[in-house]
Image: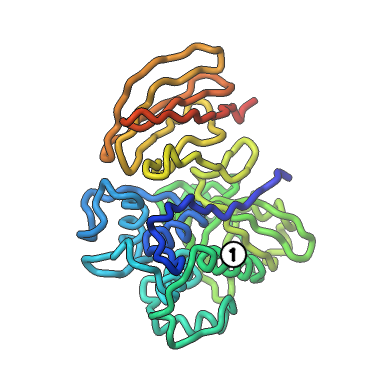
């Protein structure tokens, strides 16, 4: 069984975003919550908030999360205002997909959610209670720990559905390691562990279901066979959400980490990965102008560049060789940083 490492991603936060009391801004607080689930965000065509525009740090994540029902503010997001406990909790519960009706989960549901997931004692003053970076990280870790402790009933589906289309437009193959879940996003990777024998399998969500009361996930035949005899039919299991398929190194099944910061002010939306797969495109975009000065290939060959990339643009690179690449990136003012990327091939 491959090793699987779960990372809680935190951001390097400029001191300027904090008030004197140490409160975290709404923008930075939300980005900690979002990045801790390793979920991809896709840039919408047009801004939703008049105070979060395309060139702004966190635009893609904040805007995409709003289209998914995680953020529900109208017109203004107030990115630099202090984050309050009520919004932090609401974003946490919604981002974790803890309910099928997450789009309708409002502030009046927070007390009930905290009764089930006891990560903090409920207080009526949450809407006026400003919190710190440490508070956000602790809440996220506590909730994720509680979710990993929950026991679910897991079944499988096979011949009757083999070759049919899934809810996400794929063709269901019972011999692939996949699963159906009611709420987790498409391409989420989940480590499923049988509580009776401790056997685990990491599945990719590519369908919706199951639609049987009391059951929480349908595994493909191949996935179920990894953790239990097929004749058993249903098992009790725990779930560990690992992140999106694009954030996991398929060669070693570890969560991918990205080098995000050129300087405190200039940051990639995702960044240069520490590890990558040969032939797969790397796409770099940042909140401000940055420059790709050059790339050094594994064989020592250096390609000198002077490629300026704006906030609305992307720099694309596809590695063609196995080994270590060095990216020399910087700001238009002349700051330069070296970022290294190890490229492998899962077929070897």
> The N terminus lies in which quarter of the figure?
top right
Where is residue 132? Give x, y as percent.
Answer: 48, 67
Can the viewer see residue 28? yes
Q: Is residue 114 toward the left or the right of residue 232 in the image?
A: left
Can the viewer see residue 101? no
> The C terminus lies in which quarter of the figure?
top right
Where is residue 316? Give x, y as percent.
Answer: 37, 29
Which residue does the image show at 71% across and 54% down from the upper left?
200
Relative to 46, is 232 above or below?
A: below
Secondary structure under tag 1 reads: helix
Which residue does the image show at 48% across and 56% down from the upper left?
207
Where is residue 21? Give x, y as percent.
Answer: 45, 69
Tally of marks: 1
Return the residue nearer the eye: 78 or 282: 78
Relative to 107, is 63 above or below?
A: above
Return the residue nearer the eye: 68 or 195: 68
Q: Residue furthest front?
A: 20
The image's colour scheme reads rainbow
Q: Which residue is mark 1?
A: 141
Which residue does the image show at 74% across and 58% down from the upper left?
228
Q: Residue furthest bottom?
A: 124
Local packing at callout 1 (Cα closer than 10 Å; few below 14, some 14-19, many 20+) is some
Q: Residue furthest right?
A: 197
Corner quadrant of residue 120? bottom right
Where is residue 266? Give x, y as percent.
Answer: 37, 41
Relative to 260, is 59 above or below?
A: below
Which residue does the image show at 48% across and 86% down from the upper left?
123
Q: Is residue 26 toward the left or the right of residue 230 in the image?
A: left
């Amino acid at each position: 069984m491959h090793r699987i490492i779960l990372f809680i991603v935190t951001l390097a936060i400029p001191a300027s975003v904090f008030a004197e009391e140490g409160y975290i801004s709404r923008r930075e607080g939300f980005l900690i919550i979002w990045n801790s689930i390793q979920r991809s965000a896709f840039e919408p065509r047009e801004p939703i908030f008049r105070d979060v525009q395309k060139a702004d740090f966190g635009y893609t994540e904040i805007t995409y999360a709003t289209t998914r029902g995680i953020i529900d503010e109208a017109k203004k997001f107030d990115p630099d205002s202090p984050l309050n406990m009520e919004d932090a909790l609401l974003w946490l519960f919604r981002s974790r997909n803890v309910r099928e009706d997450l789009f309708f989960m409002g502030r009046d549901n927070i007390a009930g959610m905290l009764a089930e997931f006891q990560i903090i004692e409920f207080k009526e003053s949450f809407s006026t209670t400003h919190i710190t970076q440490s508070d956000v990280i602790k809440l996220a870790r506590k909730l994720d720990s509680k979710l990993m402790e929950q026991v679910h009933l897991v079944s499988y589906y096979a011949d009757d559905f083999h070759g049919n289309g899934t809810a996400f437009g794929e063709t269901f193959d019972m011999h692939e390691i996949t699963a159906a879940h009611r709420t987790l996003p498409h391409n989420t990777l989940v480590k499923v562990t049988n509580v009776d024998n401790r056997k685990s399998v990491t599945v990719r969500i590519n369908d919706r279901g199951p639609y049987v009361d009391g059951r929480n996930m349908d595994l493909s035949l191949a996935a179920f066979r990894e953790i239990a005899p097929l004749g058993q039919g249903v098992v009790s299991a725990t779930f560990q959400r690992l992140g999106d398929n694009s954030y996991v190194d398929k060669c070693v099944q570890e969560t991918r980490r990205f080098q995000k910061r050129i300087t405190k002010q200039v940051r990639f939306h995702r960044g240069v990965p520490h590890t990558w797969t040969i032939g797969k495109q790397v796409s770099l975009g940042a909140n401000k102008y940055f420059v790709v000065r050059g790339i050094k290939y594994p064989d020592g060959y250096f390609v000198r560049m002077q490629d300026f990339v704006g906030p609305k643009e992307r720099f694309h690179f596809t590695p063609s060789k196995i080994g270590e690449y060095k990216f020399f990136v910087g700001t238009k003012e002349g700051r330069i940083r070296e970022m290294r990327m190890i490229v492998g091939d899962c077929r070897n």
